[in-house]
Amino acid sequence: MEEHDVFDYSKAYNEKSLWEKIGSFALAAGKGTIKKVLILYYCLQDPDTPAWAKATIIGALGYFILPLDAIPDFIPSVGYVDDLGGLAVATGAVLMHIKIAHRTLAKAKLSQWFGDQA
């Protein structure tokens, strides 16, 4: 595979598409996946987050948004396994820039959507 053959998932990212994906597939994706998405999203919104970390986050969120990826999202029980893996790798890569405030905002949003057990 040549360099130009690799899909740039960051091109799939935009905020409207992210919220639509979350709204449509939050239950199917599960709280763990959505929590990682939200933490990364809030980290992305933070002006203190460096450009390289934002690029990493945008790529991971773009991959999450796309319905047809390594394991298509519509496959029951396993459709979000690859998305969760990509989100986990991105989270690990930018971990030093994830603040308590990002986690707090994500937890509040999860509680709003899933109830207090989030």
Image (cartoon, grey):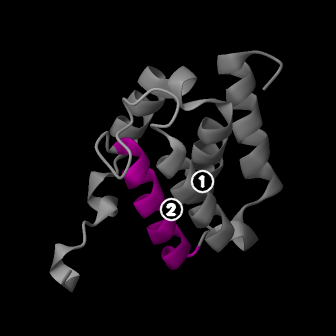
The numbered mark at residue 65 is none
Identify the magenta region: 50-65
Residue at 39% over, 31% down? 75
| Label 1, residues with CA under 10 Å away: few <14, some 14-19, many ≥20 | many
Residue labelled with disc 2:
57
Tell me where residue 82 appears, x and y as whole percent: 48, 51
Residue 30 figure quarter? top right
Dominant secondary structure, magenta: helix
Horizontal relation, residue 104 to residue 13: left or right: right
Q: CB atoms at circles 2 and 1 under 8 Å apart? A: yes
Q: Is residue 63 above or below residue 76?
A: below
Q: Residue furthest bottom?
A: 2
Q: Quadrant of the N terminus?
A: bottom left
Residue 7 figure quarter? bottom left
Residue at 56% over, 55% down? 85
Tell me where residue 100 appears, x and y as whole percent: 82, 54
Tell me where residue 52 appears, x and y as whole percent: 50, 78
Residue type of the residue flagged with mark 1: Leu
The answer for how far apart the CA atoms under marks 2 and 1 are is 6 Å
Q: Quadrant of the C terminus?
A: top right
Residue type of the residue flagged with mark 2: Ile
Tell me where residue 32 appears, x and y as whole percent: 68, 38
Horizontal relation, residue 1 to residue 84: left or right: left
Horizontal relation, residue 88 to residue 118: left or right: left
Q: Secondary structure at mark 2?
A: helix
Residue at 34% over, 47% down? 14
Q: Sequence order check: which comes first, mark 2 or mark 1?
A: 1
Q: Nearer the viewer, residue 78 or 65?
A: 78
Residue at 32% over, 60% down? 9
The numbered mark at residue 40 is 1
Q: Is residue 36 magenta?
A: no
Q: Is residue 102 visible?
A: yes
